[in-house]
Image: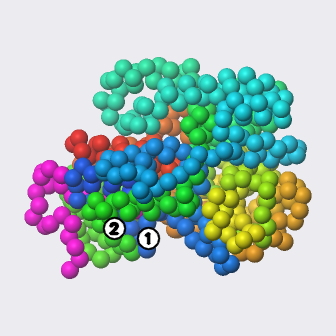
Amino acid sequence: MPFLPTGRKRSLSAPKQPVAIIGAGIGGIAAAVRLAVAGHRVTVFEAAGSFGGKMHQFELPGGYRFDAGPSLFTLPGLVDELFRLAGRRPEDYFRYERLDPITQYFFADGTRLTAWADEDRFAQEVEAKLGVAAEQVREFLRGSRRAYEATAPTFLHKSLHRAATYLSRDTLRAVAELPRLGLLSTMHRRHQQAFPQDARLVQLFDRFATYNGSDPYQAPATLSLIPHLEHGLGAYYPEGGIYSIARSLVQLAEELGVQFRYHEPVEEILTAGGRVTGLRTNRDVYDFGRVVSNMDVVPTYRRLLPQQPAPERTLAQPRSSSALIFYWGVEREFAELGVHNIFFSQDYRREFEAIFREQTVADDVTVYVNITSKKTPADAPPGHENWFVMVNVPHDQGQDWPALQQRTRAAVLRRLNQALGLDVASLIRAERVWTPPGIAADTSSWGGALYGSSSNTRLAAFLRHPNFSGRLEGLYFCGGSVHPGGGIPLCLLSAQIVADLINNS
């Protein structure tokens, strides 16, 4: 008989009662650690054969290793905090370095720009390459910092769906700041006003909308706080790649007694009398009074709670963008490239119109290339590199993805060939592709949307699904499809919010 984590006769009112977590993605792993530290017995159910969710790794023939999903790492203190909560030294499990430079930018007109970690040096680089005064750049980055510091403590670290959140002075101050921070304008308009003399710099800062799968021509200017994450707080590279984040936290979780049950997909969340009572998996039925879903909120309701009324308005919010990713083993090293590289299209507005209005991919695309072998040489054979090549695309709505994949691959190669002055296709020695339908199938992300809903409206942050159920006692949510959003830092913060809700209940 399978292990019954709760014990059939355990009182649901007992303190520190066991908790089930659905999904071993980064949010679920972090929630498991926090709850285990607080004294809960935690069991994580995962449909796949291992942990990580989108944060998994694989190898291609020839000796090329890839991080499959997330590639940018910011706010490393959120990971360190988990080890310290458990009384461990983070450096005994997990190490990282600050990137300098952060990103190499290649514009369609042939201009190249380096984003240095030092804000002053970056501002001087912009002045030298683009002709925009360094002080303009510094002032913009100061504004980005002010917006982050004014809003992050409330809008990222707390539940927006609890009345108590709005009773603090800090929250009232943050809400009062929203109009001044650009809630009524757009990111693109904010950037255009900051840098009216150079469309290239506007494009550079517009791209930060893609960090939560949104459109800078629609997303509120409040999101211009995102550049502060990189330029103010720093971008980092974990030793061994992004996968090492999940690996180190699973090691910690297991040391704390968390049980991971792989190849055991949850088929239903069981309920009775307005509360959660357990789970049914492909193996057995388990008693639990508290369940945390780290699964995308749409399939959580549609598949796991088919008898319960769903929050249709929330589930109907416009989805974020997805990605079309080409993983290439490349038979050459490129000194002009770094860990993060952006090759901009000529017409950025057209790209986003295609994604969000036409649900297709433009003929000319912006290309992101991540190369971890720059920092971890073992990720590729000597003299070679492992290229993670990504294009922002719409989430899956039944498009002809084989045709879009073929067309987009050709557009990617055109952009790279033009920027690098050679035939990139002739250097590709190994290849794999991840499409939105593949992302949806592999990670249960609805339509392959990487960040759940988009942030293309001024109230999007308030319309994301809360970290708890308003209908079912004992049901909680974490991960990229709920508050505060997608990406590694926000998933870690969602785990913090959920753990606080459970521990304080």
Report the side of 306 relative to 71 (left or right).
left
* Closer to the camera in the image, 400 or 413: 413
Whether 279 is drawn above or below 40: the answer is below
Q: How many marks?
A: 2
Residue at which label 2 appears? 260
| Magenta stretch, main secondary structure class | loop
Whether 90 is drawn above or below 47: the answer is above
Residue at which label 1 appears? 50
* Closer to the camera in the image, 125 or 403: 125
Q: Position of residue 272 (x, y in %)?
A: 20, 57
Q: Secondary structure at mark 1?
A: loop
- How crowded pointer 2 is (Cα within 10 Å; few <14, some 14-19, many 20+) is rated as many
Q: Give the Cα separation between the discs numbered 1 and 2.
A: 9 Å
Q: Which residues are magenta?
A: 1-24
* Closer to the camera in the image, 493 or 113: 113
Q: Quadrant of the N terminus?
A: bottom left
Q: Quadrant of residue 429?
A: bottom right
Q: Position of residue 424 (x, y in %)?
A: 83, 65
Report the side of 9 relative to 430 (left or right).
left
Asked whether the viewer can see residue 151, the reply is yes
Q: Position of residue 423 (x, y in %)?
A: 87, 65
Q: Position of residue 288 (x, y in %)?
A: 22, 60
The reply to whether the magenta stretch includes residue 164 is no
Q: Amino acid at mark 1?
A: Ser
Q: Residue at x 52, y 65 (%)?
A: 56
Whether 189 is drawn above or below 110: the answer is above
Asked whether the viewer can see residue 449, the reply is no
Report the side of 11 relative to 396 (left or right).
left
Mark 1 or mark 2: name the one nearer the start of the chain.
1
- How crowded pointer 1 is (Cα within 10 Å; few <14, some 14-19, many 20+) is rated as some
Q: Amino acid at mark 2?
A: Phe
